[in-house]
Image (spheres, grey):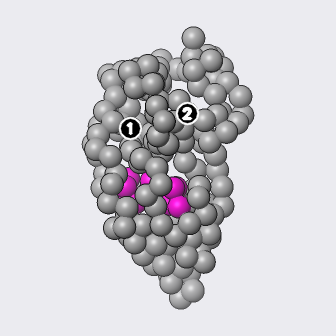
Amino acid sequence: PYTTLFRSQYGEVDPSWVTEETQPYLDAYFYFLSDTGFKPDPQWTERSMIATIHNMRLGVTPDCYGTMKREKWLVELKCTASRQPSWSIQTALQEMAIFSSNHCGRVRRFALMLMKTGKYNLGAEHTNHESDSANGIAALRNVYWRMEAGQDLRKKLELAG
């Protein structure tokens, strides 16, 4: 049943990919789709891209971009039990990347928490577009400043991992 519900630009989900551990998260996602009527656009499911925001390039991968009734929605999937305030900035940067813009506010933005119990929590809509955009751009500026100052951020990531 999942193969026709979950499509991306790479094709449909193969049921053999779903493990016992991941099954509840996938169930939660499908309950969300069934309960809300959200229709992800397969061409925008896990679509990686390089975007330029305020003349800074970054890589982003929006999880789900699609429609809910007649509205456009951007939904970031999270498999966790606690909310993070940074998710609103993440969805803002994703929206700016999708629309090649320095601002957000064209679509409704959410982080969908998928629980290991098989339930989901959509949570509050990310509506502080001006602040989320500004904070996302500030974070990018900080990364670029650090790289221009000679910090090898890739090496720091390798050491941390």
- Outermost bottom residue: 149
Residue 21 lies, in percent from the top left, at 45, 23
Residue 149 sits above or below residue 109 on the image: below
Given the image, on which type of amino acid does mark 1 rest? Leu
Question: Could you tell whether 36 is left or right of 94 in the image?
Answer: left
Quadrant where the image shows the N terminus? top right
Indicate which disc, 2 or 1, sits on the residue closer to the N terminus: 2
The residue under the point 51% across, 56% down is: 95
Residue 88 sits above or below residue 137 on the image: above
Res 21 visible: no
Residue 92 drawn in magenta: yes
Marking on residue 112: 1
Res 57 visible: yes
Label 1 SS: strand
Label 2 SS: strand
Residue 98 lies, in percent from the top left, at 59, 55
Given the image, on which type of amino acid does mark 2 rest? Pro
Question: Could you tell whether 71 is left or right of 45 in the image?
Answer: left
Q: Mark 2 points at which residue?
A: 40
The residue under the point 61% across, 63% down is: 100
Q: Give the range drawn in magenta.
A: 86-96
Q: Label 1: how many residues lie within 10 Å, few (<14), some (14-19) or many (20+)?
A: many
